[in-house]
Amino acid sequence: MVYIRLLDGITALRAKDAKEPWTFHSDVQGLVVDRDNGSLYTRVSGGQVVALRLSNGSLLWRASVDNVPQVVNNGTLYLATGKGGCTANTAPYGEVAAIQVIDGKVLWQSHLS
């Protein structure tokens, strides 16, 4: 399965036949796929991050964190936003946060200067 961020949401696409088993409609930013936990994470409008089940797109949890998912490591989702955003070649500045992927519990949030 391939997960694609579109202008109006996220679509799951079966690679073998291009069928779309599910679509999540929302204004989204960022997309991190976590195959180990069977989830994907994205920021939605309203300053929230959601976790969706990879198999069917159902909502697993929602957290009130106004940052964009960047990477998952050891059961933690790391998020960041900043004036101008973050790139692979520059240090992030602005807000950063960490969320426990199992239940959406916000572990910490911090402002970088």
Image (spheres, helix red, strand yellow):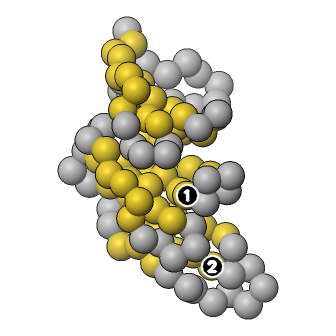
- Say which mark, if any, is on residue 13: 2
**Which disc, if any, is residue 39?**
1
The quarter of the picture where the N terminus appears is bottom right
Structural distance between the alpha carbons of marks 2 and 1: 15 Å
Quadrant containing the C terminus is top left
Quick check: marks 2 and 1 in contact, CB under 8 Å?
A: no
Q: Position of 8 compared to 32: left or right?
A: left
Image-quadrant location for residue 91: top right
The percent position of residue 23, horizontal first and vertical second, equals 46, 78
Amino acid beneath label 2: Leu
Q: Residue at x 26, y 54 (%)?
A: 45
The three-letter code of the residue at mark 1 reads: Ser
The kind of secondary structure element at disc 2 is strand
Q: Residue at x 32, y 51 (%)?
A: 62
State the image coordinates of residue 89 (x, y, percent, origin top left): 65, 25
Q: Residue drawn 54% across and 34% down?
A: 76
Question: 10 Å neighbourhood of mark 1: few (<14), some, or many (≥20)?
Answer: many
Q: Residue furthest right?
A: 16
